[in-house]
Amino acid sequence: MKLTKLVTHTILAIAGIGAIGQAKAATTPTYGNGDLFLTFRQTSGGANTASDYILDLGNVLNFNFNTSFTLSSTSLGGKYGNVGQDLINTYGSDWYTALDSTGNGGTAVLWTVAAGNLATNGSDPANTAYAGANITNNNSALTLNSGGTTLQRGSGGSQSPYINDIKAMAQNDYQGSASTANSSLGFVQASGNSNSYATKLQPNLLGDEAQTNDTLEFDRLATGVGSGQALGDFTLNSNGTLTFTTAAAAVPEPSTWMSLILAGGTVVFLARRRSGLANA
């Protein structure tokens, strides 16, 4: 009997170790100038309107926006983790489909992407901002006036301490806090905190928030530039996977270039041959 109990306890202990191994150890993330944030909040009608969920994806210049890419559980050295499970834990199993109860007809969970740098960041001059434009609803990109301070969509505009608010949110609420068990980059914060996403950054967004199934255009806005540069589009699926589709023109592979050159040469050769036969 004692041997049976010993074996049973050993098996349970091993199983417990295995279960622990499936979850990521909590980390204490730090903020860097120019970091790109993926943010979520829930409006009325959702299961948890008191919490924001944010991820610091790292320096915006670490991403190549000339190519399309996907961020899933194995991305960013595995640090992106199981964001979908974090969203379920935070907002409920219907986080992707739950509707706002105010009559707006949209989803309860809203998301966006945001980045900015107060100081020079590599090739980005100081005060370069990155923001999401919800083209599903607005069908127009973000632009800045000639001074680089006013957001404009068509003829409208509004002043915004956008980059300062990103820094305040990151340094005073996100930085140094324990990440979730599912993502080394994820952090759940109380929406009512003075430096939370919902309180500090969301009211002064340069761009827009998107519904869960919307397309969010990702725009780069540099100081003194009269119009924003649309880098591409972000979309989000029900697993929490974030996909970027570039706006850059595709560059043909070397093999494609060779095929085009050979095809062009063949056309020229045949044209000259026909011309020679016609003149014979």
Image (tube, helix red, strand yellow):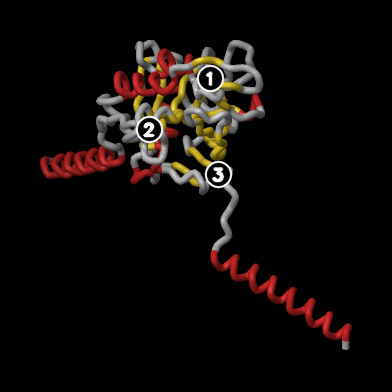
Residue 150 is tagged as 1
Residue 46, how many percent across, how many down?
A: 51, 17
On screen, 87 above or below 249? Answer: above
Q: Amino acid at mark 3?
A: Thr
Q: Going 59% across and 66% down the picture, which residue do you hit?
A: 257
Tag 2 residue: 34
Residue 142 vertical position relative to residue 74 in the rendered view, above or below: above
Nearer mark to the viewer, of 1 and 2? 1
What residue appears at the point 37 percent right and 27 percent down from the top-left corner?
118
CB under 8 Å between discs 1 and 2: no
Residue ID at (55%, 25%): 146
The mark closer to the camera, 1 or 3, is 1
Name the kind of residue labelled 2 in the image.
Answer: Gly
Residue identifier under label 3: 246
- Badge 1 crowding class, 10 Å Cα cut-off, few under 14, some 14 to 19, many 20 or more, is some
Residues 200 and 72: in front is 200
Q: Secondary structure at mark 3?
A: strand
* Helix, strand or loop status at disc 1: strand
Q: Is residue 47 visible?
A: no
Q: Residues within 10 Å of mark 2 (few under 14, many from 20)?
A: many
Can you tell which mark lies on residue 195?
A: none
